[in-house]
Image: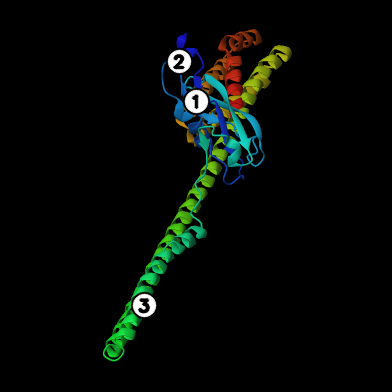
Amino acid sequence: MQNNLDPRISFLHPQLRIVKTDAINRPTNARLLQAVGATAMDSRGTDLTAHLNANLENIDFSVAGQHQVPVAVMDDRGNVGRAAFTLTIVNTEADLDGHSPIVVESAPESAAASQVASGATQPKSKRRRPKRLIIGGVAALLVLVLVIWGVSAHQNAANQAAEASSSSLAASSSAAAASSAEASSKAAESSAAASSQQASLTSQNSSLSNKVGSLKSQVKEMTTVVKNTQQAVNDYKDSNDRAQYESTISSLQQQVSDLQQQVQQGNSNAVVRGAMSSQLNKLSTTVGDLENSSSPSDASSTLKDSGVNGIVNKMQDLLSSF
């Protein structure tokens, strides 16, 4: 009996705040579950955290407000566990008020950063100029003291100082240009990495949406088969038409077989496939027993003992969790 209990879901941070964003840059299902510290375990102690799913379908991440985000997980026996955490979308980072954990996206380095890096090298060359002016002043004083003898020597020294200043300015300009180029290169690399990550997240979201849509379609079709099976037995009791009953049961058995093949070839995770296959096998056995029933009362008793209503409930729980 212990193993038939629903899985348990817990959150390390049940309150979460994020800054509003557009549909492309919105946080993923997995990122939000990681931020709230979501974990899941079935009644046998098996870790189901990797199979958690948060339902974000009705949340507009571009509008500020508070939402209850439902989270669900199903074990390999078809038991479904549910919980929810609070997601508050705020207008700006200033509205976060220091709450943690916070989901934020790292922005690429802007071109302004490279301009600041370039400008930061300029004061070094300017600080050298007062020293050169002092040297020029001393040289001029020596010229005045040694008007005749020192004229030629002073001119040579002035020429050498001018050449040194020119070389220093050229080196400083080259270093600034190299620093600016390096900053621009890093910004371009960061931007390219962000674009690649965004494309990957968009692809993942699209794949997940396709999987969920396929699963919903299969669950609805399976629920319809169960209801049609119940209706076939009821019609058999009312009309006692054996030929019509056998034709309907045969058609339902084919539908169950087709569904089993779809589930096995589907791209849903192993836990979901296992749960659906288990219920489909049970349904297939029930339909087979109904086909072999000898009378309407026998068919009605077989349907009642099969527990087919439990299959409907399991499938409805699975569908609502997505």
Q: Which residue type does callout 3 highlight?
A: Gly
Kindly identify the residue that appears in the image at 33 percent across and 83 percent down: 158
The one nearer the camera, 40 or 108, is 108
> Which residue is tagged 2?
43
Identify the secondary structure beneath mark 3: helix
Mark in the foreground, 3 or 1 = 3
Identify the secondary structure beneath mark 1: helix
- Measured along the vertical axis of the image, is residue 101 above or below residue 249? below
> Which residue is tagged 1?
277
Q: Position of residue 185 (x, y in %)?
A: 43, 61
Of labels 3 and 1, earlier in sequence is 3
Kindly identify the residue that appears in the image at 42 percent across and 15 percent down: 44
Residue 154: give its label: none
- Residue at the far right in the pictured view: 238
Between marks 2 and 3, how big is the CA–CA gap? Answer: 90 Å
Q: Where is residue 293 in the image (x, y as percent from the top left)?
A: 59, 12
Horizontal side of 227 relative to 263 (left or right) equals right
Between marks 3 and 1, how big is the CA–CA gap? Answer: 95 Å
Could you tell me if the residues under marks 2 and 3 are in contact, i.e. CB atoms within 8 Å?
Answer: no
Q: Position of residue 73 (x, y in %)?
A: 52, 25
> Which residue is tagged 3?
137
The one nearer the camera, 126 or 149, is 149
Q: Which residue type does callout 2 highlight?
A: Ser
Between marks 2 and 1, how big is the CA–CA gap? Answer: 21 Å
Kindly identify the residue that appears in the image at 51 percent across and 26 percent down: 13
